[in-house]
């Protein structure tokens, strides 16, 4: 079992999250992944939780629409569970290789969109809730040099870029209509330029991915994602 170390390093009043991938794991190969993507400074610009349910902002609508669109465009991806929260998203994603003749998840996909976990590398999952919550803190650095096509990092980079572009276009359209200094309109429960504009970064440059190795881990994480909105006040990203 791989033990991920989370190092929160303070640098110029900002936190940088360092972590390690599983050595030798091919991220363009078949696999089940628990993905977490977080907004810059964990700003709650994607919506708000009301009565245990996520109410999307205009930014959140864009983020959700682009997420679903990504799975229409990329045939190598299968979306399992997904939730968009005020400042992050969680998802269970299957990355498959349809050209694999043996051991391909493409040949094991079930009708409800979930592939069999039996062919995943078997390992003991962290079993305690505390350990699981700690694992969510980790974030994986995206490569600054080369992203393999149809890989997890390529998918996430494309998604982040698409959402940022759409939101920037929304802001530009708003500025044309209302003027850049207006403070009466809200796209995310606060004035539009208070939390995000073109001078800011929309997403944290990193993301977290966790390899799902067995059914126990699969169901534990799936339930965590499903219950995330109603457990928002206990979430580590809450604030």
Image (tube, rainbow, N blue to C red):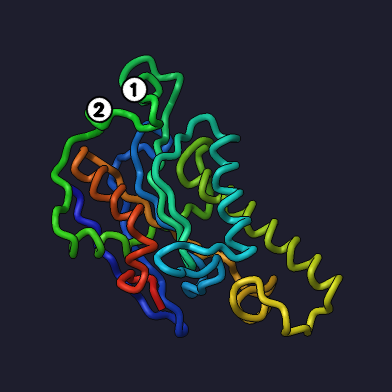
Which residue is located at x 40 percent, y 40 percent? 80
Please state if 221 lies on the left or on the right of 111 as rendered: left
Residue at the disc numbered 1: 108
- Above or below, comparing residue 190 to residue 129 in the picture: below
Q: Residue furthest front?
A: 51
Q: Secondary structure at mark 1?
A: loop
Front one among 35 and 226: 226
- Above or below, comparing residue 145 to residue 18 in the picture: above
Please state if 190 lies on the left or on the right of 150 as rendered: right
Q: Which mark is residue 234?
A: none
Name the spot of residue 86 as percent of width and height, x first. Answer: 49, 67
Q: Are marks 2 and 1 in contact (CB under 8 Å)?
A: yes
Point out the tag, 2 or 1, that comes first from the N-terminus.
Answer: 1
Name the spot of residue 135 as percent of width and height, x first. Answer: 26, 60
Which residue is located at x 39 percent, y 62 percent? 229
Q: Which mark is residue 119?
A: 2
| Quadrant of the rendered image containing residue 115 | top left
| Quadrant of the rendered image containing residue 104 | top left
């Amino acid at each position: 079992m791989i033990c991920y170390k989370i190092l929160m390093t303070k640098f110029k009043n900002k936190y940088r999250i360092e972590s390690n991938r599983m050595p030798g794991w091919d991220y363009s190969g078949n696999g089940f992944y628990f993905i977490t993507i977080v907004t810059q400074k964990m700003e709650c610009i994607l919506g708000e939780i009301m009565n245990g349910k996520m109410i999307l902002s205009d930014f959140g609508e864009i983020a959700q629409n682009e997420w679903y669109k990504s799975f229409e465009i990329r045939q190598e991806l299968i979306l399992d569970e997904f939730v968009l929260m005020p400042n992050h998203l969680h998802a269970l994603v299957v990355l498959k290789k349809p050209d694999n003749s043996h051991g391909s998840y493409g040949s094991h996909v079930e009708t409800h969109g979930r592939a069999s976990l039996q062919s995943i590398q078997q390992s003991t999952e962290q079993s305690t809730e505390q350990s699981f919550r700690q694992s969510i803190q980790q974030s994986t650095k995206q490569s600054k040099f080369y992203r393999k096509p149809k890989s997890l990092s390529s998918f996430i980079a494309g998604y982040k870029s698409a959402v940022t572009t759409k939101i920037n276009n929304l802001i530009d359209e708003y500025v044309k209509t209302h003027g850049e200094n207006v403070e009466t309109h809200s796209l995310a429960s606060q004035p539009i330029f208070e939390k995000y504009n073109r001078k800011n970064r929309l997403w944290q440059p990193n993301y977290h991915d966790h390899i799902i190795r067995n059914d126990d881990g699969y169901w534990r994480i799936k339930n965590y994602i499903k219950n995330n909105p109603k457990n928002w006040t206990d979430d580590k990203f809450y604030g």
